[in-house]
Protein backbone atom coordinates (compact mmCIF):
# COMPACT_ATOMS: atom_id res chain seq x y z
CA UNK A 1 0.00 0.00 0.00
CA UNK A 2 1.39 3.40 -1.00
CA UNK A 3 2.38 5.76 1.79
CA UNK A 4 -0.20 8.59 2.06
CA UNK A 5 0.56 12.22 1.31
CA UNK A 6 0.62 14.68 4.21
CA UNK A 7 -2.39 17.01 4.35
CA UNK A 8 -3.61 19.92 6.47
CA UNK A 9 -7.37 19.92 7.00
CA UNK A 10 -9.36 22.37 4.91
CA UNK A 11 -9.84 25.78 6.48
CA UNK A 12 -7.04 25.29 9.04
CA UNK A 13 -5.59 28.57 10.33
CA UNK A 14 -2.47 28.95 12.45
CA UNK A 15 -1.83 31.30 15.34
CA UNK A 16 1.42 33.03 16.30
CA UNK A 17 2.13 30.64 19.18
CA UNK A 18 1.72 27.65 16.83
CA UNK A 19 4.32 28.97 14.38
CA UNK A 20 6.87 30.40 16.83
CA UNK A 21 8.87 28.19 19.18
CA UNK A 22 10.93 29.46 22.08
CA UNK A 23 12.02 27.85 25.32
CA UNK A 24 9.44 28.01 28.09
CA UNK A 25 6.79 29.38 25.74
CA UNK A 26 4.17 27.65 27.86
CA UNK A 27 5.16 29.82 30.82
CA UNK A 28 6.44 33.04 29.25
CA UNK A 29 4.82 35.14 26.50
CA UNK A 30 7.01 36.02 23.56
CA UNK A 31 6.84 39.74 24.36
CA UNK A 32 8.73 39.00 27.57
CA UNK A 33 11.12 36.48 26.00
CA UNK A 34 12.04 38.83 23.13
CA UNK A 35 14.53 40.74 25.25
CA UNK A 36 16.76 37.69 25.66
CA UNK A 37 16.47 36.43 22.04
CA UNK A 38 19.44 37.23 19.82
CA UNK A 39 19.08 34.53 17.13
CA UNK A 40 15.89 34.26 15.07
CA UNK A 41 15.75 31.05 13.05
CA UNK A 42 13.29 30.92 10.14
CA UNK A 43 11.99 27.73 8.55
CA UNK A 44 10.39 28.73 5.23
CA UNK A 45 10.43 25.11 3.98
CA UNK A 46 9.97 23.34 7.32
CA UNK A 47 6.72 21.59 6.35
CA UNK A 48 5.89 19.17 3.55
CA UNK A 49 2.12 19.23 4.14
CA UNK A 50 -0.35 20.48 1.53
CA UNK A 51 -3.64 22.18 2.45
CA UNK A 52 -6.61 20.03 1.48
CA UNK A 53 -7.94 22.82 -0.72
CA UNK A 54 -5.22 21.95 -3.24
CA UNK A 55 -6.04 18.22 -3.35
CA UNK A 56 -7.95 18.40 -6.67
CA UNK A 57 -4.88 19.88 -8.36
CA UNK A 58 -2.14 17.61 -6.97
CA UNK A 59 -0.66 15.07 -9.40
CA UNK A 60 -1.84 11.49 -8.86
CA UNK A 61 1.74 10.30 -9.44
CA UNK A 62 3.09 12.23 -6.46
CA UNK A 63 4.35 10.01 -3.64
CA UNK A 64 4.99 10.85 -0.01
CA UNK A 65 8.73 10.59 -0.64
CA UNK A 66 8.57 13.07 -3.53
CA UNK A 67 6.40 15.38 -1.41
CA UNK A 68 8.78 15.36 1.55
CA UNK A 69 12.00 15.56 -0.46
CA UNK A 70 10.56 18.64 -2.18
CA UNK A 71 10.71 20.53 1.15
CA UNK A 72 13.40 20.93 3.85
CA UNK A 73 11.51 18.99 6.49
CA UNK A 74 14.51 18.26 8.73
CA UNK A 75 14.57 21.94 9.63
CA UNK A 76 11.33 21.59 11.61
CA UNK A 77 12.94 19.18 14.09
CA UNK A 78 16.29 20.96 14.08
CA UNK A 79 14.80 24.43 14.55
CA UNK A 80 12.63 23.42 17.48
CA UNK A 81 15.46 21.45 19.08
CA UNK A 82 17.79 24.45 18.67
CA UNK A 83 15.30 26.75 20.42
CA UNK A 84 14.87 24.18 23.21
CA UNK A 85 18.63 23.93 23.64
CA UNK A 86 19.31 27.68 23.62
CA UNK A 87 17.07 30.14 25.50
CA UNK A 88 18.28 32.96 23.23
CA UNK A 89 16.96 31.33 20.04
CA UNK A 90 13.45 31.59 18.58
CA UNK A 91 12.29 29.43 15.66
CA UNK A 92 9.49 30.34 13.23
CA UNK A 93 8.12 27.52 11.02
CA UNK A 94 6.05 27.84 7.85
CA UNK A 95 3.11 25.42 8.36
CA UNK A 96 2.62 24.73 4.63
CA UNK A 97 4.79 23.17 1.95
CA UNK A 98 6.73 25.56 -0.24
CA UNK A 99 4.30 24.49 -2.99
CA UNK A 100 1.66 26.97 -1.78
CA UNK A 101 3.94 30.00 -2.02
CA UNK A 102 7.68 29.87 -1.35
CA UNK A 103 8.54 32.44 1.37
CA UNK A 104 12.17 32.31 0.25
CA UNK A 105 11.24 33.88 -3.09
CA UNK A 106 10.36 37.53 -3.63
CA UNK A 107 6.60 37.96 -3.22
CA UNK A 108 5.14 37.83 -6.73
CA UNK A 109 2.82 40.53 -8.00
CA UNK A 110 0.59 37.77 -9.39
CA UNK A 111 1.29 34.21 -8.21
CA UNK A 112 -1.08 32.63 -10.72
CA UNK A 113 0.41 34.54 -13.67
CA UNK A 114 3.84 33.27 -12.61
CA UNK A 115 2.48 29.73 -12.39
CA UNK A 116 1.00 29.98 -15.89
CA UNK A 117 4.37 31.10 -17.21
CA UNK A 118 6.10 28.28 -15.34
CA UNK A 119 3.89 25.70 -17.02
CA UNK A 120 4.57 27.30 -20.42
CA UNK A 121 8.33 27.11 -19.88
CA UNK A 122 8.05 23.60 -18.46
CA UNK A 123 6.40 22.44 -21.68
CA UNK A 124 9.28 23.94 -23.67
CA UNK A 125 11.82 22.30 -21.34
CA UNK A 126 10.18 18.89 -21.75
CA UNK A 127 10.38 19.41 -25.50
CA UNK A 128 14.14 19.87 -25.20
CA UNK A 129 14.55 23.63 -24.81
CA UNK A 130 16.93 25.19 -22.30
CA UNK A 131 14.80 27.35 -19.98
CA UNK A 132 15.10 29.14 -16.65
CA UNK A 133 12.45 29.38 -13.96
CA UNK A 134 14.16 32.25 -12.15
CA UNK A 135 11.69 34.87 -11.04
CA UNK A 136 8.59 32.74 -11.69
CA UNK A 137 8.97 29.89 -9.19
CA UNK A 138 7.25 31.34 -6.13
CA UNK A 139 4.68 28.61 -6.84
CA UNK A 140 6.69 25.71 -8.25
CA UNK A 141 4.54 22.93 -9.76
CA UNK A 142 7.33 20.34 -10.11
CA UNK A 143 9.97 18.95 -7.77
CA UNK A 144 13.63 19.75 -8.32
CA UNK A 145 13.92 16.36 -10.00
CA UNK A 146 11.23 17.43 -12.47
CA UNK A 147 8.40 15.31 -11.00
CA UNK A 148 4.86 16.70 -11.25
CA UNK A 149 3.38 18.20 -8.07
CA UNK A 150 0.56 20.30 -9.50
CA UNK A 151 -1.38 19.40 -12.63
CA UNK A 152 -1.88 22.23 -15.13
CA UNK A 153 -5.58 23.14 -15.45
CA UNK A 154 -7.09 22.33 -18.84
CA UNK A 155 -9.36 25.37 -19.12
CA UNK A 156 -10.18 28.75 -17.61
CA UNK A 157 -12.70 27.41 -15.09
CA UNK A 158 -9.95 25.08 -13.90
CA UNK A 159 -7.51 27.97 -13.59
CA UNK A 160 -10.09 30.02 -11.71
CA UNK A 161 -10.64 27.17 -9.26
CA UNK A 162 -6.89 26.74 -8.73
CA UNK A 163 -6.44 30.49 -8.26
CA UNK A 164 -9.13 30.54 -5.57
CA UNK A 165 -7.63 27.55 -3.78
CA UNK A 166 -4.16 29.08 -3.87
CA UNK A 167 -5.37 32.45 -2.60
CA UNK A 168 -7.00 30.85 0.43
CA UNK A 169 -4.00 28.64 1.11
CA UNK A 170 -1.56 31.54 0.82
CA UNK A 171 -3.54 33.55 3.36
CA UNK A 172 -3.73 30.60 5.76
CA UNK A 173 -0.09 29.51 5.53
CA UNK A 174 2.74 31.52 3.95
CA UNK A 175 1.21 34.93 4.66
CA UNK A 176 0.67 33.99 8.31
CA UNK A 177 4.24 32.69 8.51
CA UNK A 178 5.62 35.87 6.96
CA UNK A 179 3.64 38.03 9.40
CA UNK A 180 5.00 35.98 12.31
CA UNK A 181 8.58 36.42 11.03
CA UNK A 182 8.13 40.19 10.75
CA UNK A 183 6.59 40.39 14.23
CA UNK A 184 9.40 38.36 15.81
CA UNK A 185 12.15 40.41 14.14
CA UNK A 186 10.42 43.66 15.08
CA UNK A 187 9.87 42.70 18.72
CA UNK A 188 13.39 41.34 19.17
CA UNK A 189 15.15 44.33 17.60
CA UNK A 190 13.00 46.73 19.65
CA UNK A 191 13.85 44.81 22.82
CA UNK A 192 17.60 44.79 22.03
CA UNK A 193 18.60 48.34 21.04
CA UNK A 194 22.28 48.49 20.18
CA UNK A 195 22.76 44.73 20.68
CA UNK A 196 23.51 42.06 18.09
CA UNK A 197 20.61 40.22 16.41
CA UNK A 198 21.10 37.46 13.83
CA UNK A 199 18.39 36.14 11.49
CA UNK A 200 19.02 32.61 10.18
CA UNK A 201 17.07 31.25 7.19
CA UNK A 202 17.39 27.51 7.85
CA UNK A 203 17.44 24.91 5.06
CA UNK A 204 18.56 21.35 4.31
CA UNK A 205 19.00 19.28 1.18
CA UNK A 206 20.76 16.17 -0.03
CA UNK A 207 23.70 15.99 -2.39
CA UNK A 208 21.67 13.62 -4.55
CA UNK A 209 18.39 13.90 -6.41
CA UNK A 210 15.62 11.38 -6.83
CA UNK A 211 15.58 8.59 -9.40
CA UNK A 212 12.30 7.51 -11.02
CA UNK A 213 11.91 4.65 -8.50
CA UNK A 214 12.22 6.99 -5.52
CA UNK A 215 15.87 6.29 -4.68
CA UNK A 216 17.62 9.59 -3.92
CA UNK A 217 20.94 8.63 -5.48
CA UNK A 218 21.44 10.77 -8.60
CA UNK A 219 24.48 12.86 -7.78
CA UNK A 220 24.23 16.60 -8.24
CA UNK A 221 26.78 18.44 -10.40
CA UNK A 222 29.92 19.23 -8.42
CA UNK A 223 29.14 22.96 -8.36
CA UNK A 224 25.81 22.27 -6.62
CA UNK A 225 27.07 19.94 -3.90
CA UNK A 226 27.09 20.91 -0.26
CA UNK A 227 30.10 20.38 2.00
CA UNK A 228 30.02 17.61 4.60
CA UNK A 229 28.26 19.82 7.16
CA UNK A 230 26.80 23.15 6.14
CA UNK A 231 27.00 26.15 3.84
CA UNK A 232 26.58 29.69 5.21
CA UNK A 233 25.52 32.41 2.77
CA UNK A 234 25.64 36.21 3.06
CA UNK A 235 25.53 37.03 -0.70
CA UNK A 236 29.29 37.35 -0.78
CA UNK A 237 32.27 35.34 -2.03
CA UNK A 238 33.92 32.26 -0.54
CA UNK A 239 35.40 34.39 2.27
CA UNK A 240 32.11 36.15 2.94
CA UNK A 241 33.32 39.39 1.38
CA UNK A 242 31.34 41.49 -1.05
CA UNK A 243 31.23 40.72 -4.76
CA UNK A 244 28.37 42.49 -6.54
CA UNK A 245 25.51 42.29 -4.02
CA UNK A 246 25.29 44.00 -0.64
CA UNK A 247 26.25 41.64 2.17
CA UNK A 248 23.46 40.49 4.45
CA UNK A 249 25.87 40.25 7.36
CA UNK A 250 29.45 41.47 7.65
CA UNK A 251 32.06 39.09 6.23
CA UNK A 252 34.07 39.08 9.43
CA UNK A 253 30.96 38.17 11.41
CA UNK A 254 30.15 35.35 8.99
CA UNK A 255 33.67 33.93 9.41
CA UNK A 256 33.32 34.24 13.19
CA UNK A 257 30.08 32.23 13.06
CA UNK A 258 31.69 29.63 10.79
CA UNK A 259 34.64 29.26 13.16
CA UNK A 260 32.40 28.79 16.21
CA UNK A 261 30.22 26.27 14.38
CA UNK A 262 33.26 24.42 13.09
CA UNK A 263 34.59 23.97 16.60
CA UNK A 264 31.23 23.00 18.10
CA UNK A 265 30.41 20.53 15.29
CA UNK A 266 33.98 19.17 15.31
CA UNK A 267 33.98 19.79 11.57
CA UNK A 268 36.96 18.87 9.43
CA UNK A 269 38.56 21.34 7.04
CA UNK A 270 36.18 22.17 4.19
CA UNK A 271 33.12 20.76 5.98
CA UNK A 272 31.69 24.29 6.32
CA UNK A 273 31.69 26.62 3.32
CA UNK A 274 30.75 30.24 2.75
CA UNK A 275 28.49 31.12 -0.19
CA UNK A 276 29.26 27.86 -1.97
CA UNK A 277 26.98 26.64 -3.41
CA UNK A 278 24.27 28.85 -1.83
CA UNK A 279 24.68 32.60 -1.35
CA UNK A 280 21.31 33.26 0.26
CA UNK A 281 17.90 34.06 -1.20
CA UNK A 282 14.94 36.29 -0.45
CA UNK A 283 14.59 35.84 3.31
CA UNK A 284 18.27 36.52 3.83
CA UNK A 285 18.35 39.67 1.70
CA UNK A 286 15.04 41.01 3.02
CA UNK A 287 15.76 40.56 6.71
CA UNK A 288 19.41 41.46 6.24
CA UNK A 289 18.24 44.82 4.90
CA UNK A 290 15.67 45.16 7.70
CA UNK A 291 18.23 44.95 10.50
CA UNK A 292 21.23 46.41 8.70
CA UNK A 293 22.90 48.85 11.04
CA UNK A 294 20.93 47.66 14.08
CA UNK A 295 24.13 46.80 15.96
CA UNK A 296 27.61 45.48 15.26
CA UNK A 297 27.39 41.90 14.01
CA UNK A 298 23.68 42.07 13.21
CA UNK A 299 22.40 40.72 9.91
CA UNK A 300 21.00 37.65 8.20
CA UNK A 301 22.52 34.42 6.91
CA UNK A 302 21.16 31.51 4.89
CA UNK A 303 22.16 28.20 6.45
CA UNK A 304 21.96 25.11 4.24
CA UNK A 305 22.74 21.85 6.04
CA UNK A 306 23.64 18.73 4.15
CA UNK A 307 20.68 16.53 5.04
CA UNK A 308 22.86 13.44 5.31
CA UNK A 309 24.68 15.06 8.26
CA UNK A 310 21.42 15.37 10.20
CA UNK A 311 19.10 12.41 9.68
CA UNK A 312 21.09 9.34 10.74
CA UNK A 313 22.42 6.26 8.97
CA UNK A 314 19.16 4.28 8.88
CA UNK A 315 17.26 7.14 7.23
CA UNK A 316 20.03 7.69 4.69
CA UNK A 317 20.00 4.02 3.74
CA UNK A 318 16.21 4.07 3.35
CA UNK A 319 16.29 7.14 1.10
CA UNK A 320 19.07 5.64 -1.01
CA UNK A 321 16.78 2.70 -1.82
CA UNK A 322 13.64 2.65 -3.99
CA UNK A 323 10.35 3.51 -2.33
CA UNK A 324 7.49 5.93 -1.87
CA UNK A 325 7.62 6.36 1.91
CA UNK A 326 9.57 8.78 4.10
CA UNK A 327 11.70 7.39 6.95
CA UNK A 328 11.86 8.50 10.55
CA UNK A 329 14.92 10.57 11.42
CA UNK A 330 17.38 9.99 14.25
CA UNK A 331 15.90 12.61 16.58
CA UNK A 332 18.57 12.02 19.22
CA UNK A 333 21.22 12.94 16.66
CA UNK A 334 19.29 16.04 15.59
CA UNK A 335 19.00 17.14 19.22
CA UNK A 336 22.73 16.57 19.57
CA UNK A 337 23.41 18.85 16.60
CA UNK A 338 21.11 21.46 18.14
CA UNK A 339 23.02 21.25 21.43
CA UNK A 340 26.25 21.87 19.54
CA UNK A 341 24.74 24.90 17.82
CA UNK A 342 23.70 26.21 21.23
CA UNK A 343 27.27 25.71 22.40
CA UNK A 344 28.53 27.69 19.40
CA UNK A 345 26.06 30.46 20.18
CA UNK A 346 27.32 30.67 23.75
CA UNK A 347 30.91 30.92 22.48
CA UNK A 348 29.96 33.73 20.09
CA UNK A 349 28.31 35.67 22.90
CA UNK A 350 31.32 35.35 25.16
CA UNK A 351 33.47 36.62 22.31
CA UNK A 352 31.36 39.53 21.17
CA UNK A 353 28.06 40.16 23.00
Image (tube, rainbow, N blue to C red):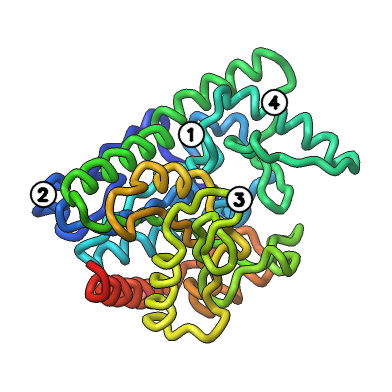
Q: Nearer the viewer, mark 4 or mark 1?
A: 4
Crowding around mark 1 (Cα neighbors within 10 Å: few <14, some 14 to 19, many 20+) is some
Mark 4 vs 1, N-terminal side: 1
Relative placement, left or right, of 245 versus 259 is right
Which is more toward the observer, 261 or 289?
A: 289
Check disc 3 and report the residue beneath it.
Answer: 244
Tell me the CA gap for discs 2 and 1. Answer: 36 Å
Q: Disc 1 and disc 3: Cα gap in Å?
A: 42 Å
Disc 3 crowd, CA 10 A, few/some/many (<14, 14-19, 20+)? few
Which element is circle 4 on?
A: helix
Element type at mark 2: helix
Residue located 49% across and 53% down the image: 247
Q: Is residue 248 rendered to the left or right of residue 158?
A: left
Instruction: Provide the residue designation for mark 2.
Output: 32
Per the image, the residue denoted by label 1 is: 52
Across and down, in percent, residue 170 comes to: 46, 30
Q: CA distance from mark 3 to mark 2?
A: 40 Å
Say left or right for 347 vs 246.
left
Instruction: Identify whether 175 is placed above or below 232.
Output: above
Amino acid sequence: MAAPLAWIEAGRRFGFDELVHWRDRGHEPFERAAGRIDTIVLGPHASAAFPRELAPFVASTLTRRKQFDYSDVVTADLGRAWADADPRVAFVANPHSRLVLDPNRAPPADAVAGLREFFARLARARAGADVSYAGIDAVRPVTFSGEDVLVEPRDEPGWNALAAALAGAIAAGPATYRAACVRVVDQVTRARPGRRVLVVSLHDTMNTRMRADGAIVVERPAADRLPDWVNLGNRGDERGERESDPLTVDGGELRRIAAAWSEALEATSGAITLNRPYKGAYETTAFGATIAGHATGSGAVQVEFRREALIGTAAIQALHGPGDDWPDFDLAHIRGVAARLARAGAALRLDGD
